[in-house]
Image (cartoon, grey):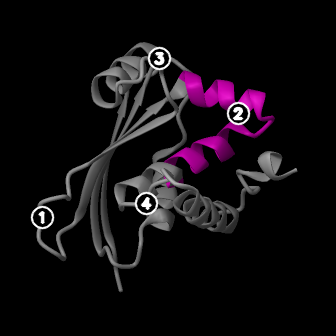
Amino acid sequence: MSRNIQLAIQNESLASPIPRKSLLKKWVRAALSKQFTQAEVTLRFVDAEEGQSLNRDYRQKDYATNVLTFTFNEDLPPGAPLMGDLVLCGSVIEREAFEQKKPLLAHYCHMIVHGMLHLQGFDHIDEAEAEAMEALETQIVTKLGYDDPYLSEKE
């Protein structure tokens, strides 16, 4: 079954160059559940100021975070395309990759996968949900050729 993915990229970040569009699309596609045959996703790369502002305005948390997910599917009929935005804060992702001793590309991949799962309704509010989401993230990220993103936490 063919899956149509429309991917828009907005780069407002002064952090390191963002991954190539072909990689971003590959990661989005890998994280997309088979139940969705179509997706319309915007990836917006921002600096800490915009990331903090969005996190404060939408989550009431006054700091820049690595990825924010905004979904537009709540009131759409079944079979509608998955639609939403992922906002990625380049400086936070860079800092985390450095602190966790991970390749920057691998951490970007993990954050795209993490955000895409949120877009599809996954969450990590309680322990059971967190374990299920982390297991799925690990499966997708390792299938894409990167190390287990939670390996340092498991050691």
The secondary element bearing badge 4 is classed as loop
Which residue is identified by label 2? 97
Magenta segment includes 21: no
Foreground tag (1 vs 4): 4
Sequence-wise first label, 1 or 2:
1
Residue 16 seen anywhere in this rendered image of the structure: no
Judged from this view, the residue extending furthest toward the top is 49
Tag 2 and tag 4, C-beta contact below 8 Å: no
Task: Give the image quarter of residue 38.
Answer: bottom left
Which residue is identified by label 3? 48
Which residue is identified by label 4? 122
Sequence-wise first label, 3 or 2:
3
Tag 3 and tag 2, C-beta contact below 8 Å: no
Q: For the residue carrying disc 4, how many other residues have a C-alpha within 10 Å: few (<14), some (14-19), or many (20+)?
A: some
Q: For the residue carrying disc 3, how many other residues have a C-alpha within 10 Å: few (<14), some (14-19), or many (20+)?
A: many
Gap in angstroms between the C-alphas marked 2 and 4: 23 Å
Q: Amino acid at mark 4?
A: Phe
| Residue depicted at 34% across the width and 78% down the height | 35
Residue 87: mark: none
- The answer to whether 64 appears left or right of 92 in the picture is left
Sequence-wise first label, 4 or 3:
3
- The answer to whether 30 appears left or right of 37 in the picture is right
